[in-house]
Amino acid sequence: METTLFLARILAVVYVVFGAGLFINSRYYSKVYGDFVKNCALLFVASLILLVVSTVIVLVHNIWEWQWYVIITVVGWVGLVKAFLFLVLPKKTVKIVGGVVKSKVLFITGGLIAVVIGVVLGYFSFL
């Protein structure tokens, strides 16, 4: 349970801060993403980092129980799939994700979802 609480606390902070940023500054983050995908080296390095971090999460916390901490497992697997797609099919993935990123509504919605996930993880791990 220590590993679960540790990962949940980290993810709670990251999701609340990043989600709030997406929600409050969606236009800025849309521009950041546009700049990010234009830099192949940066996209490659970030995808490798995501692959490593997601692999670590899955290896230490691959728990598929219908409890609050399944969120951590899902985050790990989603990260693995995302890293795989960006590393194996970068152009197609950038094109697909780029279409989604252009929508301000989806950015704001994504930010709110991230904040909710962060608050749930924070509630169960810090209290």
Image (cartoon, helix red, strand yellow):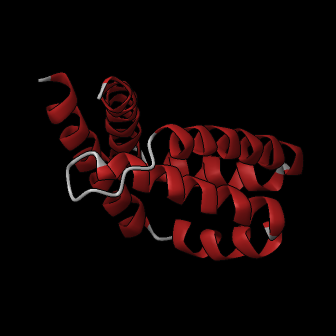
Q: Is residue 74 above or below residue 42?
A: below
Q: In the depicted view, which residue is nearer to us: 82 or 6? A: 6
Foreground residue among 68 and 116: 68
Q: Quadrant of residue 89?
A: bottom right
Please name whichever residue, 64 or 22, is drawn nearer the observer in this view of the structure.
64
- At 80% across and 40% down in the image, what residue appears? 45
Residue 98 location, quadrant: bottom right
Front residue of 101 and 90: 90
Numbered disc total: 0
Q: Position of residue 63 (x, y in %)?
A: 37, 50
* Position in image of residue 34 (x %, y %): 68, 56
Say if 46 sits above or below 38 in the image.
above
* Residue 95 coordinates in the image, percent (x, y): 71, 74
> Which residue is painted at 82% across and 48% down in the image?
44
Image quadrant assignment for residue 56? top right
Residue drawn where x is 53% and y is 46% of the image: 58
Residue extending furthest toward the right: 41
Locate the C terminus and report the quarter of the image it occupies. Answer: top left
- Image quarter of the N terminus: top left
Query: Outermost residue toward the left?
Result: 127
Residue drawn 69% across the image and 39% down it: 52
Q: Is residue 63 left or right of residue 28?
A: left
In the displayed structure, does residue 122 sit left or right of residue 31?
left
Residue 111 locus on image (x, y percent) = 35, 52
Asked if residue 125 lies left or right of residue 61, the reply is: left
